[in-house]
Each structure stands twice: as C-alpha cells, then as structure tokens.
Image (spheres, grey):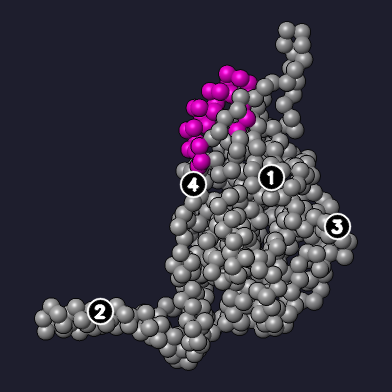
Amino acid sequence: MKRPGGEGTTSFKKLHNKQQLKPVKKGVSVKLGVAAVLLIAFPTLYFFYFFNAAAASASATNSSSKIDVQKLWDAADSDGWRPSSIPRSDWPPPPSESNGYLRVRCNGGLNQQRTAICNAVLAARIMNATLVLPELDANSYWHDDSGFQGIYDVSHFIKSLQNDVRIVESIPEIEKNGKTKKIKAFQLRPPRDAPIMWYTTVALEKMKEHGAVYLTPFSHRLAEEVDNPEYQRLRCRVNYHALIFKPHIMELSHQIVNTLRSQGHFMSIHLRFEMDMLSFAGCFDIFSAKEQKILKKYRKENFAEKKLIYSERRAIGKCPLTPEEVGLILRGMGFDNSTRIYLAAGELFGGERFMKPFRSMFPLLENHSTVDSSEELKDNTQGLLGSAVDYMVCLLSDIFMPTYDGPSNFANNLLGHRLYNGFRTAIRPDRKGLAPIFIHREKGQVAGFEDAVRHVMLKTSFGGPHKRVSPESFYTNSWSECFCQTSASNHAHRCPSDSEHEVTDNSNGKRE
C-alpha cells in the first residue's frame, strides 16, 4: 500500500581533496598487514578528515561555505526559463468520433491518483478514446470515498482539456434491440510502466471490440519517459492547469496560507516519519520493542519480504529523517528559532518523544488543524481533504522541504509543481551524504558538525531549472519539455508566440 501522501543556478565550488598512500615494498605479509590496518582505520580516518576539511573550508573560504538563508525565501534563479505547456507543433483537437470509452480506476493516495489522472488523459489522447471521468479508489488507508467530484473542479477539468481529449462523466446509455443499456467495459490490467505501443495495440483492440475498456488498477501504468514532447506537455496541462481542487478546498487552503503569511515568511516541511514509510524502509532499531513489533507486522502485511539491516540502510541514507535530524539540518544551514514552519504529515510514529527535540529548536510549528479556524478539517485530517489542503499550503509556501522524497508521491509531485509555479525554493536533503555525519554525531563526534552539514547541503538542489536524471520522475521535474525561453538560442526552447497569454496564477493554478 502506498501513500500520497532543482538544483539552483548558483553554482558552488566543490572541494577536491586527495590523499595518497605510498606503497610498501617489504613482502606480501607486510602488505597484508598494512591493508588490514587501513581497512580497520579507514572509516575513522575518513570522517576525521571530512569533518576537519569541512571546518577548514568554512574558515578559509567564507563566501563558498555559507548559505544565504535570506535568498532562500525568494524563488530560485530561473535563468530566463518560464513554464509553458501549450502545444508547439501541430496538435489537432480530438476527432468528433472516438474509438470508444476509456475507464480507469486510480488507486493509491491523492498524489498517486493525480499522476494516474495525467496518464489517463494521455492514454485517451493516444487511443483517440473518450475518457470517462477517472475513478478515485476509496482505499483502505484513507477510508475516503469523496471521489473525483468531491475533490476536483469537474467542469474546469473537462473544459480546460476540450482541445486535447473528449471527457464525459459516465458512459452513456445506448439503444440495442429496442433496449436501453450502458456499454459494458472490458476489464484490463495494464503492465506497469506500459509503453505507448501497448495502448495502441492491446488496449485499443479490446476497445474497438467491446466499445469500452476499464483499466484497473491504474497507478504507474504508462511509461513516464516518452519521446514525444507534446505528450509530456499534455501531462503538464493536466497536472498544473486542469486539476484544480474544488472552490471550498482552495478557499480553506488560502485562509491557512494567509494566516501563516500574516506573520512573515513560512516554510513547509513534509515530515515522512510515519508508520508506512518506516516499515517500507525497514528502519526499526531506534524504536522500542513494542513499536518494532508494530512496524514489522505492518511491513509483513503490506510489503514484499526482504531482509533489511537497519545499520546498512541508515548508512546509505535509506531511512526517513527523524524530526531531530530535520531540525539539525535547518540549524546547520542557518535557520533560527524564529522560523515559522508548517508541518504536512500524517500521524508521526513514536509520538511526542521524537518531536520534542525538533520543537525545542523550532518552536513555531503549525499544521492544518492548528491554523484552521473553521474546524472543517477537524474530523478529516487524514482524508483526501486534509491531503489536498496540505498540498496547496506546501505549494504556496515560501520554502518546501521534503524529508523523504524516495517513494513519496506527495513530495515528488509538489517538487514538480513548485518548479512549474515559478521555481519556488525547495530544500532537498542529501540523506546519503548526511547519514555518516549524523551517525558520528551520535557517537559523540560533534566538532565541525554544522560545517559538515552545510558542506553537504551546499551541493543540493534549491529549486532552479536542472536536467532530469534517473531516478528523478517527470512529475518531479518536467524541465525542459514544459518550459521555454523568450530569448533562446536553441529554437526548440523558444517560447511560442501565443505562450505570452499562458500564465500560471500561483493562487489557483489556473491557466489564463
């Protein structure tokens, strides 16, 4: 079961340090002895060197070792790029006659469903099919049957995509042999990350045969990387222009944002220190025996069996950051206790004892329940409504920080949306680079700790345009397909003339 929940253009010089060991030429036994000593001593030598190198670098080159926190409250440098997802080549409207009806059931949480909706629209375009309004799975985690109509603005969705695909709310009834009945859709299970060819052959054949097909489950069932940039731009039109939450959700989200911003800048953090993610990652050892039993039971019931060793997982950054580690990163970067933080998270596993160190560093913590004066979210903090509000608040915050952007649809989609909404600042911790620093701190090696954290974070992303490199998802980074430059030397990157009218309003996400 899964939940939903750029690199800045300012370049920083990397420190390249080399150590050379002189070869020992006194026989095989001596060589083996030296090798054994080095093997044992290397981790300590490395971290001693790393911490001291970071500290020396900080004092020697002050300008390249400090992070300008004030600049992070502004958007990243766009380098002349702007969002643009309108077609740039021949893109005819859908034919009046389609090949049949396409139904899909989008499983998972809100943001996994969101990517599935984008894929469904693209699949309908590819197959020249009429898309039936996507079904949202009322899954066992959310216990929420709001459906598409309860979360998204249906009329806006249909109208904004009228030049791309035909969309209906349900399969219409037909008359056959004097009787009126609905077309029965043929059920298919698409392969994971199915290529376009699967839709134009297998699925289309069944659609023409039966009049309609029903694709279920429909999560990650269409390959993200496709060669046609117009197909990718269609995904962006769906994701960033057509999928707008219902007016009352938008109004509630803006009330929360306005309350937070009335006292200055604020940062949003997606704290993924939750039972499902901890179980998935296999990070148990910091919990009590009773808590470990709960996590292991959850893992056994929901994920494939696999031997996971905590120390190994932690050492390579595969564990979600603890709340305390998040606080230490922010403090190392230069944020102080006056920083206002909005937490987007489900129920944190382990309770208040894990939050206490974070709260002591950053006491101005809020979530949608503490800020919502209407109390509309009181009984729906874990449902699709709560997730939708969290999404909008994080989208509109000055800075967004995901603490675990591995298999996290919420964090990954937000990173992509913020990139498209004007390169809004994102802080993406390098968990692999930070892990050994935290491990050594726990062992009492605190000298140069903050310098070491800063040294790692200087090399991470801060929200500017950057090349997409696997495993980064298209939904996390749609540059450059869904962006253009008004004065580009490369004709393929030049903004089309009518893109001047395409504006993403950060307050509602609509294209105007």
Q: State yes or no: discs 4 and 1 in contact (Cβ < 8 Å).
A: no
Q: Amino acid at mark 4?
A: Glu
Q: Inspect the image, locate mark 1, and give the three-letter code of the amino acid beneath it.
A: Asn
Please tell me whether residue 209 is drawn above or below residue 267 in the rendered image: above
> Residue 175 occupies which quadrant of the picture?
top right
For marks 2 and 4, give the CA distance: 46 Å
Answer with left or right where residue 224 lies relative to residue 395: left
Determine the residue positioned at 68% across, 66% down. Answer: 348
Provide residue 251's location: percent of width, then percent of height.
83, 57
Is residue 212 within the magenta segment? yes
Between the C-alphas of marks 4 and 3, the distance is: 39 Å
Q: Which secondary structure, mark 4? A: loop
Q: Which residue is mark 1?
A: 139
**Helix, strand or loop at mark 1:** loop
User: Does residue 26 belong to the magenta stretch?
Assistant: no
> Is the residue 89 above or below the residue 328 in the image?
above
Residue 78, compared with residue 505, is above or below; it is below
Q: Nearer the viewer, residue 390 or 10?
A: 390
Q: Residue type at mark 2: give it.
A: Ala
- The residue to which callout 4 is attached is 225
Residue 36 tag number: 2
The alpha-carbon separation of the residues under discs 1 and 3 comes to: 22 Å
Residue, x 49% and y 90% (percent of image)?
A: 447
Q: How many marks?
A: 4
Picture quadrant of residue 406? bottom right
Disc 2 vs disc 4: Cβ atoms closer than 8 Å? Answer: no
